Every structure is written in C-alpha cells, then in structure tokens.
Image (spheres, helix red, strand yellow):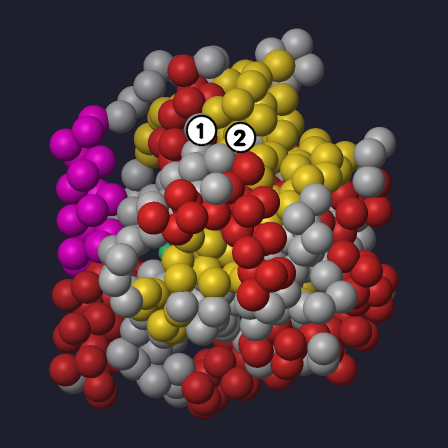
Amino acid sequence: MIDTMLKSIRPKTYNWSNWAGNVSCSCEQIFYPHTEAQIVEIVQLAAQMGKKIRVVGEGHSFSNLVQTDAFMVSLRAYNGLLAVDKDNKTATIKAGTSIKKANAMLFEQGLAMINLGDIDVQSVAGATATGTHGTGLSFGNVSSEMVSFRIVTADAQILNCSARENAVLFEAGRVALGLLGIITQITFRVDEAYKLEYISSSADFSETVQNIEQLNHKNRNFEFYYFPYSDKVQLKKSNKTDKAVRYNKFLAYINDVIIENVAMQTICSIAMRFPTWFKGVNRFMANNFTKETKINYSHQIYATVRNVKFKEMEYNIPIEHFEKCIKALKELIEEKEYYIFFPVECRFVKADNIWLSPAYQRDSAYIAVHAYSTAPHQPYFDDVEALFCSFQGRPHWGKMHTRKANYLANVYPKWQDFLDLRAQYDPNCMFVNPYLSHMFGL
Ligand SMILES: Cc1cc2nc3c(=O)[nH]c(=O)nc-3n(C[C@H](O)[C@H](O)[C@H](O)COP(=O)(O)OP(=O)(O)OC[C@H]3O[C@@H](n4cnc5c(N)ncnc54)[C@H](O)[C@@H]3O)c2cc1C
C-alpha cells in the first residue's frame, strides 16, 4: 500500500514556501493522500523510518509552523463534504477542504458557517489549528464551532474526539498547531444560510475607541481599521438582513480587486519609491478608502481578496485593556514615526475554553499590525509586541511573533497540560519541527 502511495507522490524536488513568501523549506517528500487510510500509512511510514511530519494546510500562516526538511503532508486531495445534519445544524467536512469550497458546498445545502475571518482560502484544518477568527463579540473563533474531529495520532491510531469521546484531546486538539496529530475531518456547528448587510464608513479614532462597547453590542460583526498618522478609522459593520441581495459582480470586482488590491499595490510601490511620503500615504488612505454598502450571503461578505503581499503580527488582548492598548499604540506610532503604510486592524472575539486558543477564558480584542512584504518591519513589530505583552497579549499562532515558553506559560493557564498531553500522544516528537521545539521548550 505504501509503495502504491509513494508512486502518487510528485517526482521532483520538494520546495515549499508560504503565501507571504517569508517561510520556505526543501523537504524530503510532500505527500498528497486521497484517503484516511493513506494518511495512516504515511504516519506508519514516518514511524518506521524515524521521520518527522509537518502537515500543511494552504500555507497562509506567517510563522514557521509548517517548515520541515522531512515529510510534509498536504490534505489538499482529501477534501469535500462528508455529511450534513440539518436538524442539529452540523456539517462534517474533510480536513483538507478550503473554506471557500466548504462555503460553496454548505450553501448548496442551505447552510453556512457561523462566523469567518476575512479570507476563505485556508483549509478548514489549517484555519482551526491556529485559532483563526473573524470578528463579533457574540462569536468565538472558528475552532469554537467544532463539535468533533477525527485525528490520526503518532502511533497511527484514528481517534474520534468530541465532548463525549476522548474529551481531553477534544478540549486541546481544536487549536493544536498540528502537534497532536493529523486531523482528517471536522464536524462544525453551522447555521441556515443567511444574508449580511455590510457597511463601510469613516469615523473619528477617539470617538470610535470610546464607543467600542456600544459598537460591538449593536453590530453582529464589528471591526475597524485605524490609519496611522491620521485621526481616522474605517468602520466595518455587518448585520443579518432579509433585504434582497445588492451585489454587482462588476462593481465588486472594481472595488475588491482593483481598488483594494491594485490601488493598494500602487500605494505600496509609491511609498517604497518615495520613503519620505509615508505619512501622507497613510492620510491619503484614511481619506480615500471605499465607503460602501453591500448585501449578500454571509460567505460572500466575509471573504475578501488579498493579492498584495505583506507581513503581519496579531495579538489577542483582554477586551478590558483594549482602549488603553490601542491609544498607546497610536501614541507609539506617532512618537517613533515607523515607516509603515498599512492600517492597524482591530477585531473582537468571544471567550472560549480551548487550551491554546488566544481567546481562552477571556473576551478579547485582536489588534493586527502589517508591513509591506519588502518593507522593514522589525523595529515596528518589536516595539508593538512589547506593548501587547505589557497587556498580557497572546500572539495569533499563525502570525509573526517572538514569544517562547517562558512567556507563553504565564499567559496560558493550560500550557503545562498541553505539554503533558502532547508528550503522551507524541512521545518521540514526530509532529515537532525546530520552530515549535524552540517555542514550546521541547
Ligand atoms: C492574507 C491573509 C489573511 C488572513 N486573515 C485572517 C483572519 O481574518 N483571521 C485570522 O485569524 N487569521 C487570518 N490569517 C491567518 C490564517 O488564517 C492562519 O494562519 C491559518 O492557520 C492558515 O490556514 P492554512 O490552511 O493556510 O494553514 P497552514 O498555514 O498551512 O498551517 C497552519 C497550521 O495548521 C496545521 N494543520 C494544517 N492542516 C492540519 C491537519 N489536517 N491536522 C492538523 N494540523 C493541521 C499546520 O501544521 C500548521 O501548524 C490570514 C492569513 C493571510 C495570509
């Protein structure tokens, strides 16, 4: 069986890099299993040969989670909808399915994901493994909508995990960075297909920050972009509606692809060519972003197109510290005059009970900072990270950060429990790479 599977492996050198282009590796093999049985065989093969495995989703993490010189496993060929239960509103999806494909298949069944982030190209397992989130204080991250999952562990066993079966593994395994094994399928809580009315508008920074509680309370999904070196923000609000779809494919292309991406690319190129203009560039964006209203089915509203390559760091802050933290960030940017020309993104997420979820047991604000792919980011990210950590910040696992076990153990109450569980299920560190080993102190 293994021989048959090996024949299906692409016969070439196995170079891999992530979406942002800041992480790459050459690995011994990239496996593309088509069945769960093949996934088991890959784990058996790795155990026999003493090889490490890293599973890759769609490579949309900015951190070195996937990097390996040994076996890489992509579940891209293991995708699709396995079952829906319309009475209980759940859907079971193969782990390699992209969010975009999952959305389309659910929509055909009259169903939809409950809440999502701002792109839809990640795999469902990759997104949940890092605690990917959208915005809206009534919703946890995407992993918090997991009802159960199946996982192939390092001893090549297939385990069903839910609140009733292998409950401890379920608690921890919903955000586990691929450290507990290869997740093969996930059952999500879903909703009946619903429409959202999205409104983008301009507002004053101080007023917005003062009214954060009300803005979150009044809107199903609320977030804002703060434009450095200006006092302006872009408010983004989405609410459920029964109104007719208001969506023009051509206009959407102009807005989402041309304005949001081509114009952004041009702005970045100008800012790189004329470095002294960076403050003006930010103010230009603050005054010229697209103010619009659109009504569509939820998955069409959540997903945006991101063609301009950037680097990103995002931290989770306890919501009660948000106002102080974002004001301090604005002051820091204005004082240090970092050479940046991307807005700061602020989102809000409900607490959950997943051990390594950044929103573990605290309602949270997420603050994300970005730098253009070829622009220097270090001084900005370093200072901002120190600021976030002074508010007990927890890094988004899929984004850039420099935290290690000595810090993380203090902000994650279940840190040691996770380490113990990992050691129990993977004593030989099959699923660990040097980055994770360093971060977790293994
Ligand atoms: C343009 C852009 C926009 C983004 N927007 C958002 C956003 O709105 N909200 C947000 O929270 N994040 C966002 N992210 C971050 C992104 O959602 C996460 O980094 C996510 O993990 C990427 O999913 P992926 O499928 O590409 O997984 P990868 O990056 O390939 O892998 C991520 C992790 O998942 C693990 N994994 C993958 N498959 C499996 C499996 N089958 N079993 C076990 N472990 C597995 C990998 O080992 C790895 O540790 C964005 C990233 C980019 C580049």
Q: How many marks?
A: 2
Pick the front one: 8 or 4? 4
Q: Is 250 in the magenta?
A: yes
Q: Quadrant of residue 108?
A: top left
Q: Is 185 in the magenta?
A: no
Looking at the rendered structure, the kind of residue marked 1 is Gly
Name the residue at 66% across, 10% down.
87
Name the residue at 55% across, 56% down.
45
Where is mark 2, residue-wise? 93
Secondary structure beneath label 1 = loop
Q: Position of residue 440 (x, y in %)?
A: 70, 75
Kindly check if marks 1 and 2 are in contact, taking CB atoms under 8 A apart as contact.
yes
Where is mark 1, residue-wise? 80
405 versus 360 height, above or below: below
Q: Earlier in the sequence, mark 1 or mark 2?
A: 1
Give the magenta range: 248-263
Is there any visible trace of residue 398 in the rendered image?
no
Q: Position of residue 29 (x, y in %)?
A: 40, 62
Q: Main secondary structure of the magenta part?
A: helix
